Image: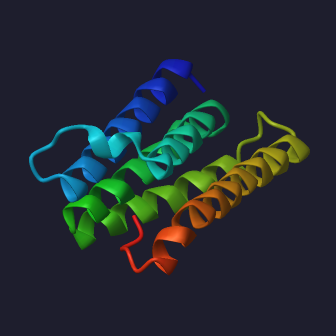
Amino acid sequence: MSWPSKAILAAALGWLTCWAVGRVANPPYTGAATKRPTVLVALGTIVFLGFVSTPGILAGFLLAALGHATRERLIASLGLLVLVGAVALFCCDFELVLAARAGLLVASGLVLLGARFVLWRLTAPEAKAGKVAP
């Protein structure tokens, strides 16, 4: 696995996240929406996945996020298919020991669950106050 491809895909996914959030929150993009804690948690998760996952998994997330942001079901579905295929190829990779592959998958899952918990905690006060959760 080459680090430049993972870095480029992680940077593209981070930019797409900031673009999509700014587009939804502030139609004339000002950049203020990217400083929200939920976006910072998402960017931190993207950076971590950039270190531990494969380029195929990042590309799948990128396509799925792009399809979701533009409301294109075909692109989102293609992203999910790429994501499933990348995970399947990662599981069949014989360069890593089975315990290492399982550990990476568990670590990625725990990071995503942890990010979801943090996002839930950050948006819970806004939901109780009647505001729309980000």
Q: Residue at x 35, y 35 (%)?
A: 12
Considering every residue shown, the one lying at the far front of the view is 129
In front here: 52 or 47?
47
For this orientation, the residue located farthest to the left is 28
Q: How is the image coloured?
A: rainbow
Residue at 54% of width from left, 69% of height from top? 125
- Quadrant of the image containing the N terminus: top right
Q: Is residue 93 above or below residue 102?
A: above
Relative to 20, residue 9 above or below: above
Residue 54: image x %, image y %?
59, 38
Q: Is residue 14 left or right of residue 58?
A: left
Q: Residue 134, how many percent across, how many down? A: 39, 64
Residue 131 lies in quadrant: bottom left
Residue depicted at x 64% and y 57%: 118
Task: Give 34 or 114, whichever is nearer the viewer.
Answer: 34
Count the marks: how many?
0
Nearest to the observer: residue 82 or residue 32: 32
Q: Is residue 45 above or below residue 110?
A: above
Q: Residue at x 44, y 56 (%)?
A: 82
Q: Nearer the viewer, residue 62 or 134?
A: 134
> Where residue 115 sits in the image (x, y, percent)?
63, 54
Residue 95: x, y in percent?
A: 77, 33
